[in-house]
Amino acid sequence: MRPLPAALRRAGEPGQTARRGRDLARAGADGVRDVLHPLVTVGRGLVRLTTAGRAWWERTPAERRSPVLGLGGLALAAAYLLPYGPAVAVGAVLLAAAWQGRKPPPEPDCTGPGEEELARLQALYEALVPCFALPEDPAPEPLYAPDGSWERAFEEFAFTPESRIERLLLRYPPWFRDGEPEERHRVERLLRAKAGRGREYRFVWEEERNRLELSVPEPLPADLCAQRFVVAPGETVLGFTDTGAVRRTLPVADGAETRDVPPVVWRTGPRSTEPHLLALGNPGSGITTLLRSVVLQALPHGDVLVTDGGGAGEFASLAGRHGVLAVESSLTGALSALEWAAHETERRLLAAQHARQTGRPLPGDVRRPLWVVVDRPAVLSHLARAEGRPDPQELLEVPLRHGRAAGVTVVVADQFEGAEGLSQAVRAYTRARVVLGAASVEQVRAVLGETPHTTPAPDPPPGRGYARLGGGPVLRMQVPATPDPYDDAAGERQRQAVQALLPEHSGQVAPVG
């Protein structure tokens, strides 16, 4: 008998038969999947449409649901009465479902935390036990106990590639006094120490659900230079803040590109509730940079009077420019300038009252804003007391008290070491506040009246800090880079940006009186 061919011999082997069976089964599964793929796509789309419609219905106010049901009923009646209406309606729904279900659901992340990350979560949980545990807690299984685990307390978490905590959402007991700043600060300080120093952290307390979220905010842009911002008259950009913290963005030039950045906008003028500004910080924190940025934005629309109590010549580039009335750094010049500002405020106030009583528009010199910028007033007050002369801060009371009605805006800046020397009028009438530099939480709360939602930066760049306008929230802020154009140590691009914003020389320094 002739032997069988090799191919037939291999086909009769048990292993080859099993392999052919698996290939046939795989081919059959692929065929079934190809046949069911359109049905799966449409089904997935129907589920997504149903979920979106339910979410929209829950968001719709109760008073708007009846009109929506009426319109839906009319649409169904019209589709039923029209020729081929039901078939067209069903086809439209199927097409919409196929479009919504064209993308498969994302693959679930099954990696999970590693051993080091689990150890970090357990260590953080054990550190929170003294804050959230209660010896007489009646609950059978307390959220926080010395022998407990983090699974019930921590709902969501995320880590960086270096296994450092990047986001954490935790639950805390209902009896915790989350309305007291001291209790909150104790928990935030502990979380900051255990999550790792050297970074900024944002804390969001949700009292209604007893939840606390810790996250690492994105860094603020520290390389944006001073420029003409697209704002309305009476609006001044103090700096830039986090995305989502404010309701608007501004187009800002960043080199050759333009990007939208959320700004901290301070509104001045007769209708402003925060007509005056107070800025405090440490040496080198960027206080003078903030004042220079404010002055450059004010010059196109108003007149500026600058008093430099530090005497370091930081505002020398403004002397003799159009719109700059004077730049005074001596005690005698400061007293003369502030006395003139007080008289000018009274004159403007009387002129405005007379115009309103007679039914006439305000004069042009009253409508044009006047900015009084005072840097380091505590130093001037100390020199005045030493020489037995009047306190310059007493001359600021009239512009501070009546400046909003007279079109006069006062900007005061000083260092923390001279904050105790500020007068009561300065403290009372400056409702727009800024804190720059490496300040503690207690210092920020003492100036702004509220604890910030983020921890201070460990080594902040110049111009980094917090701002609060009136009774609004505390905003993290970065001042645009506005160095002295005569400072050779500053960057060339930044100095040129400031130089381009300076008005032309008027040929002479305008007299104060």
Image (tube, rainbow, N blue to C red):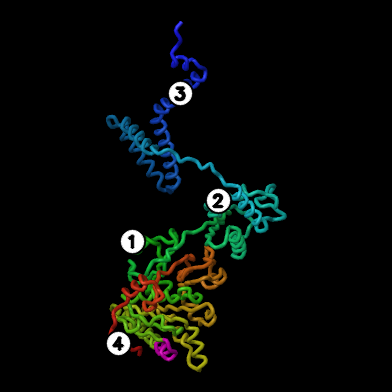
Mark-to-mark CA distance, 3 and 2: 44 Å
Task: Report the residue that reaches farthest toward the bottom.
Answer: 388
The residue depicted at 49 percent of the width and 90 percent of the height is 384
Alpha carbon distance from label 3 to label 1: 57 Å
254 or 414, nearer to the observer: 254
Residue 332 within the magenta-colored segment of the rendering: yes
Please identify, in this view, whether the residue under mark 3 or under mark 2 is nearer the observer: 3
> Extreme top residue here?
1
Q: Are marks 3 and 2 in contact (CB under 8 Å)?
A: no
Q: Is residue 224 above or below residue 401?
A: above
Q: Are marks 3 and 1 in contact (CB under 8 Å)?
A: no
Report the residue marked by disc 4: 508
Q: Which disc number belongs to residue 157?
A: 2
Q: Which residue is mark 3?
A: 23
> Which of the two discs, 2 and 4, labels the residue nearer the N terminus?
2
Q: Quadrant of residue 65?
A: top left
Residue segment shown in magenta:
329-339
Q: Residue 505's spot in the image, x, y percent?
A: 29, 82
**4 up-or-down from 344: above or below:** above
- For the question of whether residue 179 can be seen, the reply is no
Q: Is residue 52 visible?
A: yes
Query: Looking at numbered disc 2 in the image, what kind of residue is underneath it?
Result: Phe
Q: Is residue 495 above or below residue 330?
A: above
Name the residue at 68% across, 58% down: 130
Q: Mark on residue 173? A: none
Instruction: Please name the amino acid that badge 4 sits on.
Output: Gln
- In the picture, the disc for residue 258 is 1
